[in-house]
Amino acid sequence: MNLPEPYRLLIFLAGTLAFVGFHAAYLVWVERKGAGRFQRRPGPTEAGYAGLLQPIADALKLLSKQVIVPPTSDAVLFRAAPMMVMAPALMCLAVIPFGETLVARKVNFGLVMVFAFGSINVMAIMLSGWASRNKYAIISAARIVSQNVAYEIPMLLVAITLLMMMGTMDLQEIVRKQAGWFWNWNLFQLAANPLMPVTFLIFYICMLAETNRAPFDMAEAESELVAGAFTEYAGMGFGVFFMAEYANVVVGCSLATILFLGGWQSPIGWLPGPWWFLAKMYFLIFCVVWVRWTFPRTQFYGLLNLSWKILIPVSLFTLVLTSVMLKLF
Amino acid sequence: MVSQEPTCSSDLSQVVRFAKLDELLALGRANSLWPLTFGLACCAIEMMAAGASRFDISRFGAEVFRPSPRQADVMIVAGTINKKMAPAVKTLYDQMLEPKWVIAMGNCAISGGPFVFPGQYAVIEGVDKLFPVDVFIPGCPPRPEALIEGILELEEKLTGKRRWPRVKPE
Ligand code: SF4
């Protein structure tokens, strides 16, 4: 948009905050409604029409709940962790292109920036567990570190595969290169790499693991670790983690949309725009909820084995395959 | 001696009114009563049934069973409280943060239920011996509908309004 720079930035700042706030609140509703539907029960129905006021009731409740900082905890880190988990998601949205001109900041290394800030999220959850000085929280913090190390690798390998194909780190440029009908999307670029759908699947699984969604929610394994890293958080401190989880899901699904599903490009070749972006993103988010309420939580060893024994070798193979294909054809 | 009424507070209430805000907060709290994941005996099975698809307490926003007492609002004491279990239950209650409520579900939690007889030495006769209780739900075990009724009763205690008209037993 052609507004003077300070106004443009302010508008986008407010827009990003509203976007994240709205999605964090209403994805909770989607999740609870979805959970209900997947288990053949209605989900929230009483607070407002179809339970639409449920997130507002929850927010009021959480805001008016007592907050404590346990006396044995590290008070500074304990307070800083919720902020650190929310801020990176907001930062990532600054470079995500929602439409042809609808992007807060054009950065030509957007991909690196999203990955750089994306990993702060996991570190913040680790810090929250560490600062609580609660044995369950510390076990959870240790798990988060190994989980993050294991899943960051295949995710970055997939990103490198895409980088080789696209030749740019500018997210807007990546979307532009996927213009036209849906077979131009990276997901269907079988000429560059016959295993492209597998690559997408790896990316999606890693995204689930990085955002701590079931079946990989080792951070909050309530059957083993009380509430994991969030055990000591109450009221809005906990609410922020709750919201940040959904904010990170939004970022992850946006990134998957941009990298594989052609971002704001239309699947039928005309009328590209932000609505396509949102439609694809919501579809991916729906799949996240679907996966969560369909699969039980994995064991921790299963989680690490999946990454080290399957995802990393396969993603390395697709990386090599892509480079060979690029060289040959 | 005549007790000195604190006049300032009654004067203040004429000027500063938080009634609307309080009502709003009460509505918010009543619609998101997160229970503690916590069951002691057979009544807990009925509590689980209340969360499952046939009865579904999620309609009232109360299905978010939080495993950590820090995040829970209402403790549903579902089952027999043994003398050995009592300290743990008390600790859980103390770890919950204000505002917090307690529902005593089943005869055991109300008065010891079938375990009361002369000379019994193992069971606490009623959870109100340990901490204050807001709603009692009789039954051995109470049906899930009764637990839902208990939650509605607690909501009425918070907001002062009944959500649905009360059903008269025939
Ligand atoms: S009241 Fe009856 S059903 Fe409930 S815990 Fe006691 S004995 Fe079991």
Image (cartoon, rainbow, N blue to C red):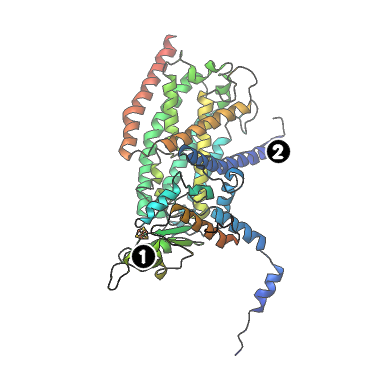
Of residues A216 and B48, which is closer to you in this image?
B48
Q: Secondary structure at mark 1?
A: helix
Q: Is residue B111 above or below residue A84?
A: below
x%, y% of residue A19? 61, 39
Judge whether B88 appears above or below A9 on screen: below
Spatial CA span between label 1 and label 2: 69 Å
Give yes or no for contact between labels 1 and 2 (Cβ–Cβ under 8 Å). Answer: no
- Residue B15 placement (x, y as % from top left): 71, 69
Checking the image for residue A90, the label placed there is none
Dot 1 falls on which chain? B
Q: Nearer the viewer, residue A29 or A306?
A: A29
Q: Nearer the viewer, residue B112 or A122?
A: B112
Q: Which residue is mark 1?
A: B113
Please, what secondary structure does the residue beneath circle 2 have? helix
In the displayed image of the protein, which residue is found farthest to the front?
A: B170
- Is residue B114 found left or right of A180 in the rendered image? left
Q: Residue A88: tell me if it is visible.
A: no
Q: Is mark 1 within 8 Å of ligand 1?
A: yes
For discs 1 and 2, the disc positioned in front in the rendered view: 1
Quarter occupied by residue B93: bottom left
Quarter of the image where one finds residue A104: top right
Percent x, y for residue A204? Answer: 45, 30
Image quarter for ligand 1 equals bottom left
How packed mark 2 is, by other alpha carbons closer than 10 Å (few <14, some 14-19, many 20 or more), is: few
Amino acid carrying label 1: it is: Gly
Q: Is mark 2 within 8 Å of ligand 1?
A: no
Q: Chain of mark 2?
A: A
Left or right of A140 in this view: A238: right
Q: Disc 2 designates what residue?
A: A7
**Does the image show residue A137?**
yes
Q: Amino acid at mark 2?
A: Tyr
